[in-house]
Structures are given as structure tokens and as C-alpha cells.
Amino acid sequence: MTAPLLQDTGFREATIWATPIRDLGLTIEGTQLEPIVAEFRRELEAVGFRRLSPRYYLSTEWGVPFETVAIAIPFYLAHPELQEMHAERTGHVEGRDREEILRYLRHEMGHVVNYAYRLYDDAEWEALFGSMSEPYEDDYRPVPFSRKHVRHLPGWYAQKHPDEDWSETFAVFITPGLDWRSEYAARPEALAKLEYCERTVAALLDREPVVVDDELDEDVGELEYSLAQFYRDLAAADARLGLNLDTMLRSVFPATGARAGTTPHVAAAELLRRLEGELLGNVYRWTGHFPERTRVLVHHLRARAQSLELCYRTEEEPAVTVALTTLVTSLAMNYVQSGGYLR
């Protein structure tokens, strides 16, 4: 059903913006999420999961609370206007469409299976994926194109923690129509994990789960803060970087407003504004540098480009776009690998 408060007004109205999220009436039922969740249930049935059925609910982000079988879906995916607002304020949406939402559901189901059957206690699981007691760090440093890990979600996510490595492997294994044997034939260590997953899932299908707790964490119906507060907290890290990248920017955009003359020129800051969404997604996909961090970096570059009055000729746009993308990607890779943008 549609959120009751939307019958007379939109999410952008001040009254909605200040309303506690719990009072927005958000549900999975009656939204774009309902048929996608139903499709995912059919995927699980096709694999053979009939004794294990997760609970789906809306929360602040994707996730599965430890030792539960409940899958949290970001609340902003329950309404297109909320999704649009989230994209505007964070620059990135984890679940932009049906295909991407299914990808996240497959990953989260990996956590459900791991916790439901406590696979992490199995000696072979630990030998392949690692110990669950390893520290879970948000600032992990992935090795791009690692032959030891599968690739499902963007950002080399399997390298974040053994629990994520298993979940990514499981997601690849259950993806309909994917020939994972051929896909990972040249990566024996990743293939060994997939073959373990195949054997393990086959053995689990006729077993009752050990863990059946479906307690919810940060259920949307209990979120006391408003949309304004939620996004204000997310934006707290959106501050100036204090980096001097002017020389790098000038190498990409050598022209300035003072030297542009009468030849048609485009402001470099305008190009950065247009490319922001594409940069956030692609940089995360190939480097693991989180979109919220890339957003701060791009905003800093845009502010400096505007201050320096940098510009380019319209016919140069393809070349400067490649150069700018390379610059942002290189800075992101530096951060991922060394903890700083400038080594």
C-alpha cells in the first residue's frame, strides 16, 4: 500500500520532510519491491530452498542482523520519490532497478544461509573463507582483479570480510543462468569456493535451519528520526578535503576564463557536476572507494575548478572526460591502497 501521507502531498513537502520515518507508512507490499521479492522467492524455490524462508523488511540499509534470518531492505527503495531524493543527497542508490535489487537480495541471502546453519563453524568453510572473528572494517583495502574472490556486488566486496566472501560466493552460485564454472575456470581458488558452496547447499536443502530468529534491527516502523535528520547525519562527512589538487586539475583543464577569449568554452565545474553520478558508480565498481567519499572528492574538485575558472573547448570534451575520470580513479585507488589520496 502507498504511504498514507502521500495521498495529499509528496515527500518533498516540509511536513513530510520533518515527519518521523516511522509515520510515513512505508511497506514492501504495494510497491515496486513486492514483485521483486516475490521473484526472488521463486529463485530460491528453484534452487531448492523450502525449509529456509527469510523475513523481508524495510530498514536504513541492506543487511542481515547476525544470527537471524531477516533481510533488511533500504526504506528509500519503497517509493520512487524517496529513491530520487536519496540519489540527490548521497549520489548513489544501492538498488537502482529490479536487476540490482535482485543482486543485493542474493548477497543478503548468503548471510541468511550462513547464520541459519552456522556454516562459519565448519572447518572447511573457515579454511576457504577465513575466520568470522576477523575484524570487520569499513575501510578495507581490496586487491582489484583478485583471483581468490568472486565478483558480484561492486567494489570488490568479497574481500571485505570472510562473511562477505561467502555471501558473494553464494550470490554468484544462485544467480540464474550464470555459468560460474566457465566464468571462474581460470581462477582456481575462487572456483574452489563456488564448488564448496554447491556441495554445501545441496546438503542443506533437506535440513531444518539451526537458527530461525527473525528479529528486526532498525525496522522502518520504529525509526523515530525524520528524513531531514537521516540525511543530515549521512552528510556529516561532506566537508572540504584540505587537499591541494590545483596542479592536477590544471593538467586536465589548461584553459582559464581569462585566456578563453571568444572561442566557445565550457566551465570545468559544469562537467564535474554532470559526471558526478557516473563517477560515483564507476569508481566504486572498479576501486572499492565508497561513493560517499568519491562524492566529497568530486565536490572538492568542482569547487576548486570553479575558483580557478578552469574551462575547456567543447570539442575537447571526450578527451577531458577521460582525463578527469582517470584522475578521480587514480586518487580513489591511492586512498583504497594507502589510506590517503596523495601518497
Image: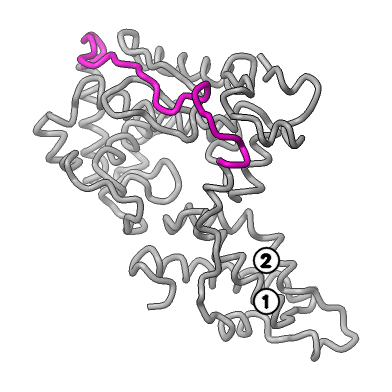
**Which of 101 and 184 lies nearest the eye of the viewer?**
101
Magenta-span inclusion, residue 213: yes
| Residue corresponding to mark 1 | 305
Magenta: main secondary structure: loop
| Residue corresponding to mark 2 | 272
Compared to residue 304, the image places residue 26 above or below, namely above
Compared to residue 99, the image places residue 229 above or below, namely below
Image quarter hosting the C terminus: bottom left
**Which of 47 and 181 lies nearest the eye of the viewer?**
47
Q: Quadrant of residue 114?
A: top left
Question: What residue is shown at x 40% (from left), y 67% (from top)?
Answer: 335
Comparing labels 2 and 1, the label whose residue is closer to the camera: 1
Image quarter hosting the N terminus: top right
> How far across and down, in percent of the image, does residue 72 sit?
44, 27
Q: Residue furthest left?
A: 123
Number of numbered discs overlaid on the protein picture? 2
Region in magenta: 204-229
> How far across and down, in percent of the image, does residue 212 sit?
28, 13
Q: Residue furthest right?
A: 262
Q: Amino acid at mark 1?
A: Ala
First in sequence: mark 2 or mark 1?
2
Q: Amino acid at mark 2?
A: Leu
